[in-house]
Amino acid sequence: EAQVTQNPRYLITVTGKKLTVTCSQNMNHEYMSWYRQDPGLGLRQIYYSMNVEVTDKGDVPEGYKVSRKEKRNFPLILESPSPNQTSLYFCASSTRDRGRVVGELFFGEGSRLTVL
Amino acid sequence: GEDVEQSLFLSVREGDSSVINCTYTDSSSTYLYWYKQEPGAGLQLLTYIFSNMDMKQDQRLTVLLNKKDKHLSLRIADTQTGDSAIYFCAETSSVSGSARQLTFGSGTQLTVLP
């Protein structure tokens, strides 16, 4: 089954304790991205990756890191989480069709993070 | 930067039509999308429309685009309880419709009442 898998789905942590949210897709997609969803603000892009070893900042990258060492994986790293990073996080991937990246994103189920 | 706006809530009776509205500011938008988010799940693409189209119909869904007013709407005919979800409008000005450059609205929570 084609899917984007995120882990953990739920996490409560404390300020300053490093954490990683993993994301894996089995569709051989070149493009992967991380979003955060906050009430009334919709989805805001954190980081994205056009392909292996190619990453770039989205709209709200502060406090986050990513890496893309393999095509299928795109982990999100919070080196020193703070309470304002409490949010619902989504990983998404997309294919490149005939040299174009089509606008259909495939989303994971989300990771709800609480930072105390 | 680009902005996409939606009302936050909409309630309709089962069997009625729902109309979810969206306005955007980017006059160079090329593709506009509607995504659906069911409770506890990620977003799924419902439908999309090219900016050179006025309307697109897909079974119970009708998308209307008024490019002059930068207004997009999603009409769901014969709304069912399974249609209860958050609906996100999104746009891109990428000529290739690149997923990299999608701007999402805040989402409209549709509640279908029995």
Image (cartoon, rainbow, N blue to C red):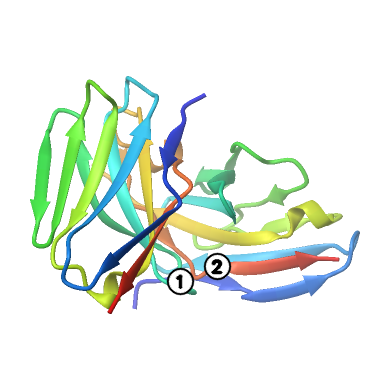
Q: Secondary structure at mark 2?
A: loop
Instruction: In the displayed orientation, state which residue is furthest to the right.
Output: A16
| Observer-nearest of A35 and B72 | B72
Q: In the rendered structure, which amino acid carries the disc numbered 1?
A: Ala
Q: Secondary structure at mark 1?
A: loop
What is the quadrant of residue A107 in the picture?
bottom left
Q: Estimate the x, y position of residue A65 in percent, counting from the top left.
A: 72, 49
Q: Chain of mark 2?
A: A
| Quadrant housing the C terminus of chain A | bottom right
Residue that appears at 53% across and 67% down: A24
* Residue marked by disc 1: B41
* Residue marked by disc 2: A110
Above or below for B30 versus B48? above
Q: Residues within 10 Å of mark 2 (few under 14, many from 20)?
A: many
What is the quadrant of residue A23 in the picture?
bottom right
| Observer-nearest of A64 and B91 | B91
Q: Is residue B85 left or right of residue B40?
A: left
Q: Is residue B55 left or right of residue A65?
A: left
